[in-house]
Structure formats: structure tokens, C-alpha cells
Image (cartoon, coloured by chain):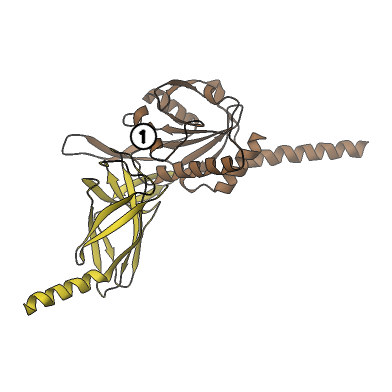
Amino acid sequence: MKSFLYSVLIISVLILFGCQSKFPLNKDLTKQSYKFFNQDSVEVTFPGFIKGKTAVMGFIYTNCPDICPMTTHNMIITDEKLTEEGINDVQFILLTFDPDRDTPSVLKKYAEVRGINFDNWTLLWGDKENTDKLLIRFDVMALPSDSSYSDDGELNYYMIHTDRISLIDKDGRLRKNYQGSKVNLDELLNDIKELGE
Amino acid sequence: MTAVLTFLFLFIQVSENIVVKDQWVRPGAKGMGTALYFTIENNGSEADTLYAVTSDISDKIMIHQTYSKGDMIGMKMVKEIVIEPGKAFKFEPGGYHVMVMKLKHDIKAGDETEFILHFKKAGEVSVTASVAKN
């Protein structure tokens, strides 16, 4: 009986530490609530609107021609692969860290031209204060870099930013971060499935 | 007449030294930006320089390079690209790319878009880029 209890204890510890090493983060995002607007300018509360769902969240700005589309595309492929496997309850989120230019309608166009399905995708726009607060929660940095004025007086600028996709569990806890543009899709898929079980 | 023919012959020879292949462009919405990628092969005996890209789809196109700084990623403008003789130069995701700003109309997967690459020696090289899904 004693050896049986020891075995159970050892297995439990192994399972516990095994999970922790695979999902090293456990940041509760539900302690604070943030007001955002989706691509249709409808107010949503983050993370309230994803409660009960595993969520994959990317951080982008739409004037980014190279890295952010790579991140977006990786999320699109992930969604397609999950759908092929009959998993349709994962929420995909893209948050802009350039709220001055990426209005909800701009975000909607960015998604539409890529064939994104809004049934399980939400593009988030927030004011600078809420956006900055949420970026801090995710340890994402985004700063304007080179800037110039075009002939018509419009300010053009690029941004230097963290290249990030984050995985959030059903309880609103941040569990893992990935390099958005170069994420290992098999790793992300397996993590999503494991967290969703 | 001979001089003209000789000039044309030389021009064609030089142009044929530059081969642009594997070109593709990302989807993009009107008013937004996108990126063009390709490989340039220089089969000639002299270096050549890509200094501009133009297209009817945008009035503002620049050569850019994506760079990393710690965990951060950004991009910067590059004035020109020198392709050494016998070498190839790749524009690829996460590296060098041609940034196409303020698109005049949507471009979606399956569309094709024309670009002109301007070289110092080879002159203008036209390419048709397919719009990829990503």
C-alpha cells in the first residue's frame, strides 16, 4: 500500500512538473479588464470575451509589410489545421499596437483581404492607454522608429516591436509565448490541443 | 545603322545578364502596404545595382530590410542592392523586401501584379508577381 501511494505521488509530481515545463507561464489575465473594440467597432472586454476558450493572440500593425503578415499567416495556417481536425472552438485575436492608424475599419480590411473568418477571429483596437496597459501585461514592446512626412504632409513611420504570438488558456491565463513570424507550427498546434483538453 | 544595332545588341546582352525569378507579393488592401519578394541572379561579368522598383499599383515603393535588435524586430530603408557577378541575391520574408505602400486597389491571392525593377546597368526589368496566400 505504501509503495502504491509513493508511486501515485511520484507520477503526480512528474505530471505537474511536466506541464509546468511545457507551459512555463501562468499569468492570470482576468485580474484586470480592458475595453477594446472589434473590427466592426463593437465594444468588447478583454479577456472577458474569450472566457471558456483557448485563445491564440498575435500582436501586429497593418503598415508592417513583412513580419506582421508572417505572424498573421502563421495564425491562419494554425486555424486551418485545427479546422481540418474538427477543432473549431479556438479564438484567434490580433491586437494592433498602432491604434493611431489601425482603426477598426482598417483592421477589418487587413483581415478581409487575407480571407480571415470572423466567426472565430477578432481584431482588437483600443485607445492608447488600454493598448499600452495590455501590451505591458504581455511584455510586448512597440515603439515608433524611422519617420518621415510625405509630400501631402502625412506622417509615415515604422515600428520596432516584439515579434509575438501568445497562447491563453480557457481560464484567461497566459501560458506560453512564441516568436510570431517564426513559430514552430507543430509545437503551437500541439500546445493548443493540450491546453484545450 | 551599324552603331544602333551594336548598341541594341549590347543592351540586350546586358539585360539578359540579370534574371529575376521566384517573384511573389503578399495580399494587401487598398490604402495599405504589402511586400514583394524575388531572387535576382547576375549572370554577367560585372556587378549591377538595383536602385528602384516601380509599379502602377503604388506611387511609393522602397527597398527595405528587416532587422532584429534583441527580442525586437524593425525595418529600415535600403538605398540600393549590389548584385555581384555570378551571384544571386534573395529578397525573402524576414530579410530584404520591397515595401509597396498605399496600394491603389486590393490585391488578393491568385491576382497578378506588374513591377519594374530598375538596374544601373541592365536598365528596366519587368516582372509579373503572383499574389500569394500569405
Q: Is residue A23 visible?
A: no
- Give the SS element for disc 1: helix
In terms of depth relative to the viewer, which is nearer, B133 or B39? B133
Q: Which colour is chain B painted?
A: yellow
Q: Is residue B45 visible?
A: yes
Q: Chain under label 1?
A: A
Q: Which percent across, then down, holds residue B5?
A: 11, 76
Q: Tell me, by letter, which chain the rendering colours brown.
A: A
Q: Residues within 10 Å of mark 1 (few under 14, many from 20)?
A: many
Q: Amino acid at mark 1?
A: Lys
- Extreme residue toward the right, this view: A1
How many marks on residues? 1
**Residue of label 1:** A109
Q: Residue at x 26, y 75 (%)?
A: B45
Lateral position of residue A142 relative to residue A195, left or right: left
Q: Residue at x 68, y 39 (%)?
A: A19
Q: Which percent across, then down, holds residue A23?
A: 62, 38
Q: Which percent across, then down, holds residue B115?
A: 26, 54
Seen in the picture, residue A11 relative to A38 is either above or below; the reply is: below
Question: In the figure, residue B125 lies in which quadrant?
Answer: bottom left
Q: Which percent across, then down, holds residue B92?
A: 38, 55
In terms of depth relative to the viewer, which is nearer, A82 or A19? A82
Question: In the figure, residue A158 lies in which quadrant?
Answer: top left
In terms of depth relative to the viewer, which is nearer, B99 or B68? B99
Lateral position of residue A107 relative to residue A197, left or right: left
Image quarter hosting the N terminus of chain B: bottom left
- Extreme residue toward the left, this view: B1
In terms of depth relative to the viewer, which is nearer, B18 or A165? B18
